[in-house]
Amino acid sequence: HETGSRPTRMALLDLAKAGPDQLYVDRRHGTRVVVGDRGRCHVFSPEGKLVTSVRYAPASIDKKRRTGAWVPADPEELEGLRHLAAGTEETRPDNPE
């Protein structure tokens, strides 16, 4: 982390800028993956905690998508992850009408 080789410091900025097509669910771990610029990938727990940040080659990202290791998240999940990561979990009624 101290060498700056891991892109951890960009996690919240990439999350804020991400579109719905940049958020995936890692089927193996149940984590959420935000894909940023230049191969930056940020892994968040379902509770919104940053687990790690890594850089992947474009071919590696494509392979994870193509093989189904990463599946697109529901579009509304992006906003929920933003709220959780910011520590402001959105409250929703149990039975909206």
Image: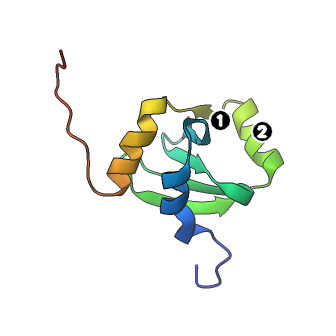
The residue positioned 60% from the left and 31% from the top of the image is: 71
75 to the left or right of 6: left
Note whether 50 is above or below 35 in the view shown: below
Verify CB contact (< 8 Å) between mark 1 and mark 2: yes
Which is more toward the observer, 90 or 53? 90
Note whether 29 is above or below 75 in the view shown: below
Amino acid of disc 2: Lys
Q: Position of residue 54 (x, y in %)?
A: 64, 61
Residue on which disc 1 sits: 69
Furthest residue toward right:
59
76 to the left or right of 60: left
In three-dimensional space, the C-alpha distance between marks 1 and 2, rounded to whole angstroms, equals: 8 Å
Q: Which color scheme does this rendered protein use?
A: rainbow
The residue positioned 49% from the left and 44% from the top of the image is: 31
71 to the left or right of 63: left
Residue on which disc 2 sits: 63
40 to the left or right of 24: right
Q: Position of residue 1 (x, y in %)?
A: 58, 78
Dot 1 alpha-carbon crowd within 10 angstroms: few under 14, some 14 to 19, many 20 or more: some
What is the secondary structure assignment of the residue under circle 1? loop
Query: What quarter of the picture does the C terminus occupy?
Result: top left
What is the secondary structure assignment of the residue under circle 2? helix
The residue positioned 58% from the left and 62% from the top of the image is: 53
The residue positioned 25% from the left and 42% from the top of the image is: 90
Amino acid of disc 1: Ala
Dot 2 alpha-carbon crowd within 10 angstroms: few under 14, some 14 to 19, many 20 or more: few
Note whether 44 is above or below 96 in the view shown: below
Note whether 46 is above or below 11 in the view shown: above
Q: Quadrant of residue 6?
A: bottom right
Q: Give the numbered dot on residue 33.
A: none
Q: Which tag, 1 or 2, sits closer to the chain's start?
A: 2
